Amino acid sequence: MAVVIGVLALQGDVREHLAAVEQAGGVGVPVRTREEIARVDGLIIPGGESTTVGKLLDRFGLMEQVRSLPDEGKPIFGTCTGMILLAKTIEASDQPRIGVLDIAVRRNAFGRQVDSFEEDLPVEGVEGGPVRAVFIRAPYVTDVRPGVQVLAEVDGHPVMVREGNLLAAAFHPELTDDVRVHRLFIKMIEQAKKRRKA
Ligand code: GLN
């Protein structure tokens, strides 16, 4: 049975994630309401602007529901803005957040000069060579607490991490044709689904 992955469709590059999910062998559905979120096996939070998306999650009454997904065996994958919203600590910010992933992040961490860049990034758990990673005003991780596994780094800064049912990347795996990172997320969901049934 294919896994159903919701892509939070409040803002950001939703369509690209839906296409990547399908190409990776999952079923992708855009989600905006509690009813839609209740039907998915896993959730992707795409890139965008994290303050806006956090406020919208609050306004639409979705924050608590999203927060409880990982404990219900429904993994979440946050990219860029999604990584920021998953983090428990956001440097110098009290913006609304999901706040379940035990890391600290710095927004726009790579600075103005390198606003956006691409890099061939080796990712732990992804076989067959490095992933072409696109960074757009990306955050990086400034603190990783016990239980969090670092899967990729740029200049010694973690840019992809996993903690249990949570996956987060500072870059945009949906913007290339390479869907190996989405496959990794699908594998996480399949394992979580099996445990849910056991
Ligand atoms: N800089 C944005 C933020 O802080 C994230 C950029 C992105 O998602 N591409 O939310």
Image (spheres, grey):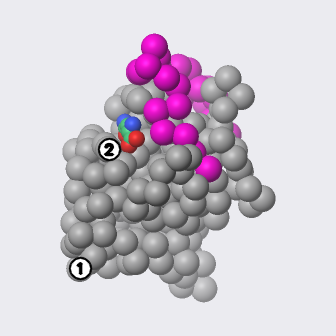
Which amino acid, by three-letter code, is at mark 2?
Answer: Glu
Q: In this image, 196 relative to 123: left or right?
A: left
Q: Position of residue 185 (x, y in %)?
A: 50, 53
Which amino acid, by three-letter code, is at mark 1?
Answer: Glu
Q: In this image, 122 relative to 180: left or right?
A: right
Rendered image quadrant of residue 71:
bottom right
Image quarter of the N terminus: bottom left
Rendered image quadrant of residue 127:
top right
The residue under the point 53% across, 47% down is: 92
**Depicted 79 relative to depicted 153: above or below:** below
Q: Is residue 198 visible?
A: yes
Residue 121 within the segment the image draws in magenta: yes
Identify which residue, 180 or 77, lies in the foreground: 77
Q: Which residue is mark 2?
A: 49
Q: Position of residue 171 (x, y in %)?
A: 47, 35
The residue under the point 52% across, 64% down is: 99
Label 1 close to label 2 by CB (< 8 Å): no
Image quarter of the C terminus: bottom right
Q: Which residue is mark 1?
A: 35
Q: Residue furthest top?
A: 113
Helix or strand or loop: what does disc 1 sit on? helix
Q: Is residue 29 visible?
A: no
Q: In this image, 138 relative to 34: left or right?
A: right
Q: Is mark 2 within 8 Å of ligand 1?
A: yes
Alpha carbon distance from label 1 to label 2? 24 Å
Q: How busy is the neighbourhood of tag 2: few (under 14 within 10 Å), some, or many (20 plus)? A: some
Helix or strand or loop: what does disc 2 sit on? loop
Q: Quadrant of ligand 1?
A: top left
**Magenta range:** 104-131
Q: Position of residue 78 (x, y in %)?
A: 45, 52
